[in-house]
Image: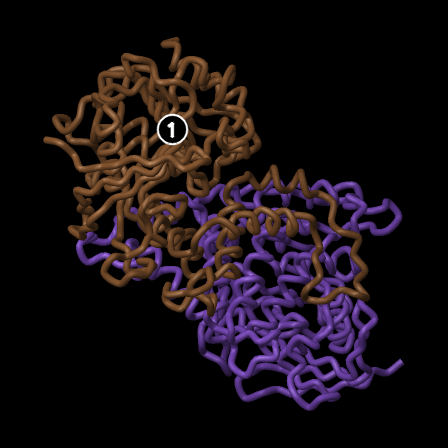
Chain colours: A purple, B brown
Amino acid sequence: MTSNFSIKERSDGLFFFHYKDGFTFESGKEISELILAYECYGELNEAKDNVILIHHALSGSSHVTSHKKNRSNGWWDDMVGPGNPIDTDSYFVICINNLGGCYGSTGPTTLNPDTNRAYQTDFPIYTFKDIAESQKILLDCLGFTRIKSVIGSSVGAMVTLQMVIMYPDLFESSIMISSTSRAYASNIANRLIQSRIIKTDPEWKDGYYVKNPIDGLRTARKLALYTYRSSNELDDRFKKLEDINIRNMTLKSDVSEVERYLLYNAEKFVKKFDANSYLFLLKAMDLYDITDGLGKLPEDSVSISTRVRVISVNTDILFPPKQQEETYSILKPVSKNIDFIEHVSDYGHDTFLIEIESIGKYIVDVLEGK
Amino acid sequence: MTSNFSIKERSDGLFFFHYKDGFTFESGKEISELILAYECYGELNEAKDNVILIHHALSGSSHVTSHKKNRSNGWWDDMVGPGNPIDTDSYFVICINNLGGCYGSTGPTTLNPDTNRAYQTDFPIYTFKDIAESQKILLDCLGFTRIKSVIGSSVGAMVTLQMVIMYPDLFESSIMISSTSRAYASNIANRLIQSRIIKTDPEWKDGYYVKNPIDGLRTARKLALYTYRSSNELDDRFKKLEDINIRNMTLKSDVSEVERYLLYNAEKFVKKFDANSYLFLLKAMDLYDITDGLGKLPEDSVSISTRVRVISVNTDILFPPKQQEETYSILKPVSKNIDFIEHVSDYGHDTFLIEIESIGKYIVDVLEGK
């Protein structure tokens, strides 16, 4: 069977994979063309056996780190690159913008051929199975039949886990950092509030907006950011309140630098992220359950013979250690070689972006078979 | 000095205290008349020495429990009443709607005599010192010079603590449950998100609304509710997801009962609470610091000779135990008789509303001098 696809490289090194055989979502909905944007780092060896697949987190893109054609910083600069823990002098790294995203891959901002305008909320509800399947199509087309390691953090690790379950023989090792195996009620609660915030913005217009509803998106992002750090970290970092003059105080006055911290980071996000893409991703996260509601993987459904490492951080309030312990418990009966690490840090969920040395060591050990 | 005041009782037993000497806020702003709504339970003895002052939490009112003239349920029904831990067969209980509230006391919904319409966002920024001072005025007018015990939970305990610091000799004992001594950055972060959600509602109109902006208020309340329980409790309670048919799923579909739980409870709230009153209270909480930024109470500023009990709950994510430990540490050097309890429960911040027996025992022991 030959697949009908093309790959184009943009001047900044962003590749666009156009798959013209169409794509059928888990929901049964179909699109006539699948587009995935991806970037590559390092050199592919002749045997094509030095590939590392990285899965980006919620706000990330395929731009993991800077490269010759795009010098701008990536989201995991110090982790990936020549001489870094994921060493591009040895490995060929690929990172694909997830299906449903807004960094080049097919998603709510993509042109709907039926209407000749963006899908917006007409985009199909998608799941992590759809993301996994779409990435498998690309890897097949690239001729990557054996991946040295697949590594994801946060939402990225939800993709990683889904792919390991669906294609266990594709990966020589897999590493999942600060993630989960299913949607917990506490997370769903947080996400529904974020969704509702966006939808309260009068600019949202049921998703058929002309202008990204940034007021709502900004506040939703603040709520997400609030869960990315531990309360201890925020409390220690922004201990001092502003100099408050109660005589001049109004409802609009700031009282703590934490307000500017959240605003600054939320502002960066709304400049680059599309509200509908955010809403669809939140929904996909709500639908995530690696066991399809069974609570465990049927014994004959999957067998993982290669190395698996599950990493959690003790202060993570978004995906607390108990969620990763459950991931470990679910994988253990079907895995030959799995371990679980609870890393201690005050940086909460964001630790993988901050403590590069510690997290890098956990990764390097797996890559080196230690 | 005679004070110029009147007290009227409504048919449902809600008393309105009108203090006509005016009130000056910490900010320097003045109002010509202070109104405080309050309710009483049990009989005042002749010596007026069986008074218990209860401080209500954020969403609470003076209606602590049902009584002859108002049979509707209160917010602490099983805690207060004949034969209950706070036994109205022995004690005379009074609960005052906090200044700034929307259950009868002067607040943003009160008529501004200058404009002949509600203050709305023209209401003065107020602080917990203002709340404490306003309650002291009422207690003085009622001739209560010695209070058997002052008891508060959550926001209520912020009032309790403020009053104990300002009027240490007024109280024979004081109990503060699940609260804090100052605004922590993590709490400010959460509150600023709630404020922003309300202000994103197009109905808010800078606070000069005709119709309470319930969409924003509802979502803000969901976020508050989210912090009132531990994630473990939510996760255990709403473990099962809805029966999901991915083919019919849309962005609007529910995936978990937790969505209805939050909606149901938020809906109850928006029917009775005013958005501006909520915003001003959040700001007052942001400004709260019992030490005025010093980190401790100057040794000669206050001396508390009577019993003080600080109670925390191990799973409280809104005001985690470390915050109450700090309250205890701040009070310890100026208190003769203080203790600290870390109660173990899965119910998080809301425990004081749920585990009446355990929390009641901690209160009864103080009332009985045990």
Residue A134 drawn at (x, y percent):
74, 71
Residue B96 drawn at (x, y percent):
35, 35
The answer to whether B3 appears left or right of A255 in the picture is: left
- In what quadrant of the picture does the N terminus of chain A appear? bottom right
Q: Residue at x 53, y 69 (%)?
A: A64
The answer to whether A62 appears left or right of B50 in the picture is: right
Using the rendered image of the protein, determine whether residue A309 is visible from the camera's viewpoint: no
Quadrant in the rendering for residue B192: bottom left
Quadrant in the rendering for residue A20: bottom right
Viewer-proximal residue among A147 and A163: A163
The answer to whether B113 appears left or right of A361 in the picture is: left
Kind of residue indicated by mark 1: Ile
The answer to whether A36 is drawn above or below residue A246 in the figure is: below
Residue A4 drawn at (x, y percent):
81, 86
| Residue furthest left as drawn | B1
Viewer-proximal residue among A163 and B126: B126
The answer to whether A250 is drawn above or below residue A344 in the figure is: below
Q: How many marks?
A: 1
Residue bearing the label numbered 1: B54
The secondary structure type at the circle numbered 1 is strand
Badge 1, how many Cα within 10 Å: few under 14, some, many 20+? many
Q: Residue at x 70, y 85 (%)?
A: A112
Task: Say which chain tag 1 marks.
Answer: B
Residue A281 drawn at (x, y percent):
63, 65
| Residue furthest bottom as drawn | A116
Viewer-proximal residue among A215 and B204: B204
Using the rendered image of the protein, determine whether residue B341 is visible from the camera's viewpoint: yes
Viewer-proximal residue among B357 and B105: B105
